[in-house]
């Protein structure tokens, strides 16, 4: 098979006294995401989509929250390590399509910086990353501003000569 697809999902609780980081970009907001690493839900969903495409498990397998070395880790660094795993197996990213679900802050002004940061981390063209934002219309924990969630799909293609 010359192409593989994977999907990923992540959700983190919003709390005070934490930075809000999505797609490797710190957003100004009174709440941030709670997690063992920097809790970047968007980047985590993308990592799970990439790993899933090659049936490599999930990020908890590679970066378990029980391991103190990942405490406060920069998710862009973790994404780089996932990308290395994929490249080592002879695969390349075709494209990534992701959506972030959050009531606030409004994410539209941050979409391009997030795409740029993710593309730089992965060494791919920003045109290979689609990023959208939506709300949950005030429904459930996300809609009540208690959490932020993200979904991602990744298409991998066999690298030439692999």
Image (cartoon, rainbow, N blue to C red):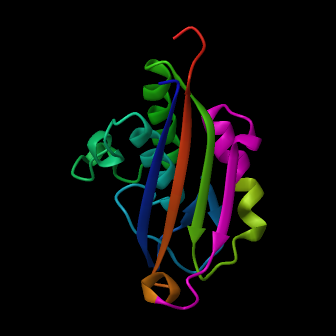
Q: Is residue 162 above or below residue 110?
A: above
Q: Quick check: can you spot residue 92?
A: yes
Residue 136 belongs to magenta span: yes
Q: Position of residue 74 (x, y in %)?
A: 48, 48
Q: Quadrant of residue 123?
A: top right
117, 91: nearer the viewer = 91
Residue at (57% x, 8% y) in the render? 161
Q: Is residue 141 above or below residue 70?
A: below
Residue at (35% x, 46% y) in the render? 59
Most distant residue in the top direction: 161
Range of magenta residues: 115-139
Residue at (21% x, 51% y) in the render? 66
Q: Quadrant of residue 92?
A: top right
The mark tally for this picture is 0
Q: Position of residue 160 (x, y in %)?
A: 60, 13
Q: Is residue 103 above or below residue 85?
A: below
Residue at (47% x, 54% y) in the render? 45
Q: Position of residue 148 (x, y in %)?
A: 50, 73
Q: Is residue 12 above or below residue 58?
A: below
Residue 60 belongs to magenta span: no
Q: Quick check: can you spot residue 74?
A: no
Most distant residue in the left direction: 66
Q: Position of residue 82 (x, y in %)?
A: 45, 35
């Amino acid at each position: 098979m010359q192409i593989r697809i994977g999907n990923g999902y992540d959700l983190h609780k919003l709390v005070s006294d934490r930075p809000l980081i999505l797609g490797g970009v710190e957003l100004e907001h009174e709440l941030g995401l709670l997690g063992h690493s920097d809790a970047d839900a968007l980047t985590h969903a993308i990592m799970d989509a990439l790993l899933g495409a090659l049936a490599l498990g999930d990020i908890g397998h590679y970066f378990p929250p029980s391991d103190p070395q990942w405490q406060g880790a920069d998710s862009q660094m973790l994404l780089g390590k996932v990308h290395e795993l994929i490249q080592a197996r002879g695969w390349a990213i075709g494209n990534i399509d992701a959506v972030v679900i959050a009531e606030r802050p409004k994410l539209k002004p941050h979409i391009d910086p997030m795409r740029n940061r993710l593309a730089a981390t992965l060494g791919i063209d920003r045109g290979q990353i689609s990023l959208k934002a939506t709300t949950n219309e005030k429904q459930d924990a996300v809609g009540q501003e208690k959490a932020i969630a993200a979904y991602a799909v990744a298409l991998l293609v066999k690298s030439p000569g692999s």
